[in-house]
Image (spheres, rainbow, N blue to C red):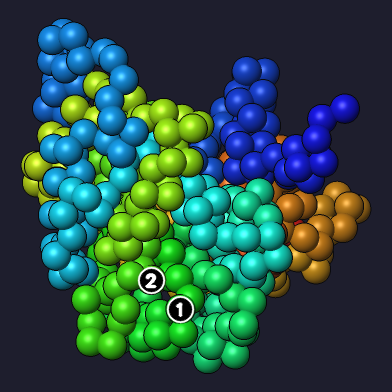
Amino acid sequence: MVSQRAQNLAPSATLAITAAAARLRQAGRSIIGLGAGQPDFDTPEVVKQAAIAALNSGQTGYVASQGLESLRDAAAAWVNGHHGLGLGPQNVLVTAGAKMAIALACQALVDPGDEVIIVSPYWVSYPALIELAGGVVRVVQARAEDGFQLPVDEILATAGPKTRALILNSPCNPTGAVADAKVLARLARNLTSRGIYLISDEIYGHLTFEGSLGFAGEEGVDPEYVVVIDGCSKGWAMTGWRIGFVATSSLPLISAINRLQGQSVTCATSFAQHGAVKALELGDSLIAPMREEFRVRRDLVSEALAAMPGVAIVRPAGAFYAFPRVEASLTGSFEGEPVNSSQQFCRLLLEQKGVATVPGSAFGCEGHLRISFAASREDLREGLARMSALIGELSDG
Ligand SMILES: Cc1ncc(COP(=O)(O)O)c(C=O)c1O
């Protein structure tokens, strides 16, 4: 049999929805995919050309496990741009995607029994990555009534002698909430001064519509305890390239992560790193057109959801997800079958109306569902119209 560790690992809920939608599509159904966790854009051409040039010039061997210096340089400049930390290439390590960066940071920081705080609704992989490192997950709830802002007082009340780290995600998957900069600074001051690490997952930072990132350089925050996670996946539409990075003032932490990476992955793909250098160098000029389209869709989705009876929506300030509350629809029935969970609602929406979304329960937040607006405006209008129709049929049922 497989190890206990592997047995304990739950499959990714988001991937399960994608697979179910693909099965229905194959069976000839018209399926609108609003479940995707990746931009529906292609990688910018200049980035592709940089990777192709690297391939053509024979950059096909291993590179340093910490990553290309030119990429670490560009990544440090990017992080310094909003955190004002004065990091250099020695403070950055390139990984095979941001998920791997979080996994390695957990492996490097967490001993068995150490507690790591996450805020619900949380990204589906955090609990698994913490537990794989032997850590204990402590969940603190952010509330829709508060616009999903960080529950700082609850976080501080939960942080105790066993707390090793807090994982933050702003802009947030699945809510799209962007944490208030002053609130973040207060939290960071308090935690880092107690020797608690703040792992700041900023993978959606490039897609911020309102609000700002950057708290690590604030007075009173100890940057040795701040670990920034970022990468090219979401901002530059490069999910398949698998380029992420970890950036921190703490050189012992970089060195530990480097050892872990050197003994497992070796290094992130060489020619993908060359493409990523171009992405980071050209930066926002490549991202801005995609962000603008996401902003238009954010408005379209927020307005359509707000108009649905019994649905409440906190307008996302970043990323490409909306996380409406559909609780009022979870007390009815459909053709005699009770509907009382977000999972059932999403299953009905997929099976009856052909719209793929992800249940809130996957993010530790029942009563909601996640709608990705990494889909065309046309698909969004049609998908939301079908969702509205289902809600109407449920209330009748
Ligand atoms: C919040 C969050 N962090 C990290 C990741 C992982 O990003 P990557 O594809 O670069 O591994 C994702 C991907 O969905 C995410 O939503």
Left or right of 201, for residue 368: right
Task: Estimate how packed mark 1 is, as few (under 14), some (14 to 19) or many (20 or more) residues with alpha carbons within 10 Å.
Answer: some
Give the vertical position of 85 relative to 277 (above or below): below
Give the vertical position of 105 relative to 190 (above or below): above
Circle 2: element type: helix
Point out the tag, 2 or 1, that comes first from the N-terminus.
1
At 66% from the left edge and 26% from the top edge, which residue is drawn?
24
Can you identify the residue that label 1 sits on?
195
Q: Position of residue 140 (x, y in %)?
A: 61, 77
**Occupied quadrant, residue 135:** bottom right
User: 188 or 150: which is nearer to us?
Assistant: 188
Left or right of 329, for residue 67: left
Left or right of 167, for residue 41: left
At 90% from the left edge and 53% from the top edge, which residue is drawn?
336
Q: Position of residue 94 (x, y in %)?
A: 31, 41
Quarter of the C terminus within the rendering? bottom right
Q: Are marks 2 and 1 in contact (CB under 8 Å)?
A: yes
Q: Residue furthest right?
A: 336
**Occupied quadrant, residue 55:** top left
At 55% from the left edge and 78% from the top edge, which residue is drawn?
142
Amino acid residing under circle 2: Tyr
Q: Position of residue 96 (x, y in %)?
A: 40, 35
Amino acid residing under circle 1: Gly
Q: Position of residue 54 (x, y in %)?
A: 16, 17
Task: Estimate how packed mark 2 is, as few (under 14), some (14 to 19) or many (20 or more) residues with alpha carbons within 10 Å.
Answer: many
Check residue 22 in the rendering and tell me which mark sits there, or answer none.
none
Quarter of the N terminus within the rendering? top right
User: 105 or 34: which is nearer to us?
Assistant: 105
Circle 1: element type: loop
Res. 376 in view: no
Can you identify the residue that label 2 sits on?
225
